[in-house]
Amino acid sequence: MRELIRQKASALGFCVVGISKADFLEQEACRLDAWLGDGLHADMAYMKNHFDLRADPRKLVVDAKSVISVACNYFSPEIQPEGVYKISRYAYGRDYHKVIREKLLCLFDFIRTVEPAARGRVFVDSAPVLERAWAEKSGLGWIGKNTNLISRQHGSFLFLGEIILNLEFEYDMPVKNLCGACTRCIDACPTKALTPYRLDARKCISWFTIENRQTIPDELKPQWRDWIFGCDICQEVCPWNQKAQSHVERNFQPLEAITAFQMTDWEKLTQEDFERIFRHSPLSRAGFVGIKRNIQFLKNIERKF
């Protein structure tokens, strides 16, 4: 059964899959509680919701026995033109939530075909599930100092997903953390949002450009790097991404606007055009108003980089 699941997952485009026992994540729950207690989640109040569900998948799925974790590569060697407003690679193509969910539903349907007694749920960053913790526990990689899951073979440009179900398996083992003494991600973060294995969302460019709904503080202006949606700096400098291979998923191919837009194109973008071009894109998370606010913020900065 394990081998059949791996074969099907590979055929669906997942680059790695692992299975772990569904039980209480005690250490991860303690770390999350401390992170929330220190206010490092900024104003993402939803992170405090359903805390007990985040730490124990058995409270999400009745009779849960296992967590199947998958990863899908989204690295794109195609980049935006030089000197333009920057978009994180994960938002180059179609919204990953829909793409990964469709693949996971296919995988789950396959499992139920092989084992009709299978019951469970599919998750893609849309419910209180500690996806990086489960991916690490399932042997997909390790959580690095930049707080991303890092795979020795595939780097960290990875989308994650889970199937929590009522079947038991022989479980995979976690892999060794290979960050070592490296601090490149921490040293490169322009707003100093990173300390080893901890992210302060209140300083993070990704949070400011996506989740934040308020004005960006003036004191951050000298540290900005032309990002208007997300930030890839801590991944771009990671040694494990230096040999990252291009994804093969057509849904993640960069939109023409991503690879062709110049600064003036972004600045002249109307709400109608935004909704037409980016209606299936992760950029819809920030919305037209958010993207325009981020652009205006950058226009007021004397460019030093």
Image: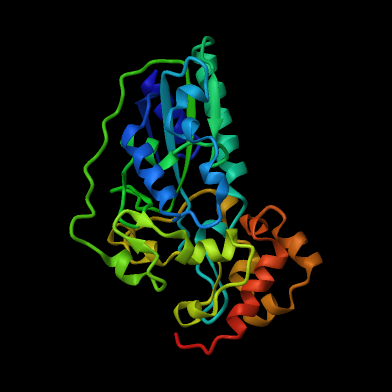
Residue 176 or residue 247, whichever sits in front: 176
The residue drawn where x is 74% and y is 65% is: 274
Residue at the left extreme, as displayed: 181
> Where residue 278 appears, x then y in whole percent?
70, 59
Q: Which quadrant of the figure has residue 216?
A: bottom right
Q: Is residue 95 left or right of residue 128?
A: right
Q: Which quadrant of the figure has residue 134?
A: top left
Judge whether residue 250 can be spotted in this image: no
The residue drawn where x is 44% and y is 56% is: 40
* 287 shown above or below 155: below
Residue 137 or residue 220, whichever sits in front: 220
Which image quarter holds the N terminus? top left
Residue at the front extreme, as displayed: 37
The residue drawn where x is 56% and y is 35% is: 103
Residue at the right extreme, as displayed: 272
Judge whether residue 260 can be spotted in this image: yes
Residue 55 or residue 231, whichever sits in front: 55
> Where residue 222 appears, x then y in whole percent?
46, 83
